[in-house]
Image (cartoon, helix red, strand yellow):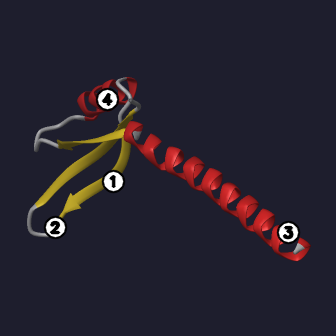
């Protein structure tokens, strides 16, 4: 008889612990609604661009929170440099 009650106590404790851990995990997953929002911005380099103008534009984007993530130079027959920026906005 004592063995049966010990088993029930153990199973009940295990169930309660599992329930608490499950609720904590569910709460953690539901907090993902506040995930950061990512934005991308593409800047194409004009054919008559000078270094000072490009530097000023890149500095302005950097001050606004944009981060350079990729430079696409185009292809051999039609070079068209593009600068791709990314900005993460927290909720």
> Which residue corresponds to mark 3?
6
Distance (Cα) linking label 1 and label 3: 63 Å
User: Residue 76's quadrant in the figure?
Assistant: bottom left
Determine contact: label 2, label 3, CB under 8 Å: no
Q: Say which residue appears at 27% left-offset and 47% top-offset.
A: 84
- Which is in the foreground here, disc 2 or disc 1? 1
40 lies above or below 74: above
Give 78 or 50, whichever is nearer the viewer: 78
Q: Which residue is mark 1?
A: 70
Q: Is residue 49 left or right of residue 71?
A: left
Gap between marks 2 and 4 measured at Cα: 25 Å
Q: Nearer the viewer, mark 2 or mark 4?
A: 4
In the figure, 76 relative to 62: above or below?
Answer: below
Marks 4 and 3, the one that precedes in the sequence: 3
Dot 1 lies on which element? strand
* Mark 4 residue element: helix
Q: Which quadrant of the figure has residue 8?
A: bottom right
């Amino acid at each position: 008889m004592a063995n049966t009650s010990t088993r029930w106590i153990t199973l009940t404790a295990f169930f309660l612990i599992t329930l608490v851990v499950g609720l904590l995990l569910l709460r953690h997953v539901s907090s993902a609604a506040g995930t950061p929002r990512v934005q991308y911005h593409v800047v194409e380099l004009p054919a008559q661009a000078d270094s000072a103008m490009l530097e000023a534009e890149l500095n302005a984007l950097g001050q606004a929170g944009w981060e350079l993530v990729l430079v696409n130079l185009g292809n051999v027959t039609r070079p068209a440099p593009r600068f791709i920026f990314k900005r993460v906005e927290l909720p």
